Image (cartoon, rainbow, N blue to C red):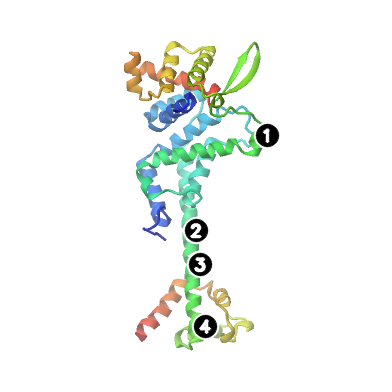
Amino acid sequence: MKTPHQNIDKAIEDFFLYEDFKEVEAFLSEELDYKVDLQKHDKFLKQLNFKLKSEINKRKDISLLDVISKNLKEGIEKNIEKPISVLKDLIGKGELSYQFRNLDKLTEEDIKELIKDRNLIDLLEELDDEEKRKE
Amino acid sequence: MTNPESEFLEGEELYSFLNSTWENEKDLLSRLDGYAAYRLSQIKNDPTKKKPSDLVQELITKFYFGERKIKRNEVGKIKEVLFGALKSHISNYLNSKAFKESNHTLGIGEIELIENGKSSVETFEQNHDHDLHKELLLKKLRELSATKIEENICECWIDELLKPADICDLLCIESKDYNNARKRLLTKLRKISS
């Protein structure tokens, strides 16, 4: 059996949840001197969605970075032409520091560091095209 | 990003569901805000000075970023899920250390009695006496100058008769009179129920 307080709490919740919202607004305004700020909520939802999009893109980039660096590392180990040429291309453009010039010694983390500022989708497409061409 | 096998909504499916909820339930955030305002209005001294909308926005952010989850079988009752979560969020806030150190709030089942000028807090869950609990609540309402209609509505709520139309029928009153009395009753209950 619920206590009297629990039943009263339920009645109060039902009022805020289901009652005609004009009645709720009238109560808030007349009894609590409180006005719900609709614009503030709209602004909050817009900001939240913006933050969310940034977060999704960040997550997508992190997962792409994992896929591509693994692909490139395997390419070096198996001596596959395309991944190696992609990395050599970076060296040719002078974008690699001296420590990265020995491809065999590159770790996946080194590769991530090297490619993180590149357009990852273009890079992935470039590697995928080569694989499909071979198939 | 979306896993249809998961028990919970995740990723883009979750974001799309929540965004459509705000579209379909235009006043839902305002209802949550209103409830938070009511609960915070019961507090005499809030050291953190949070606004009702702050609490609501903190909660909604938790749903978007996975700190709170929505089960697939809860999508049809999202209003109730969000309301339940808000109650728990407010309760955690009121039980926080910073808050408790500067405040005494009445918990569920507690009532502050003022007799002969002395204040004391009675905890009803301790004696489990439903009728005594009910009688003391009604007595407290009378001390706050509740009208007979307000007292009767409260008695209906205590006895789990919650639908306004049913209460109006039982008490033989018009819905307009019910609405007016309910407003005053809710204000009085702020002082004796939390």
Label 1 and label 3: CA atoms lie apart by 44 Å
Q: What element carries label 4?
A: helix
Label 2 and label 4: CA atoms lie apart by 28 Å
| Circle 2 residue | A55
The amino acid on which the numbered mark 2 sits, given as a three-letter code, is: Glu
| Circle 1 residue | B101
Specify the quadrant of the image occupied by residue B165: top left
Specify the quadrant of the image occupied by residue B174: top left
| Circle 4 residue | A87
Q: Is mark 3 on a helix, strand or loop?
A: helix
Q: Are the residues at dot 1 and dot 2 in contact (C-beta closer than 8 Å)? A: no
| Circle 3 residue | A62
Label 3 vs 4, first from the N-terminus: 3
The amino acid on which the numbered mark 3 sits, given as a three-letter code, is: Ile
Do badges 1 and 2 share one subunit?
A: no
User: In this rendering, which labeled residue sits more in front, label 1 or label 4?
Assistant: 1
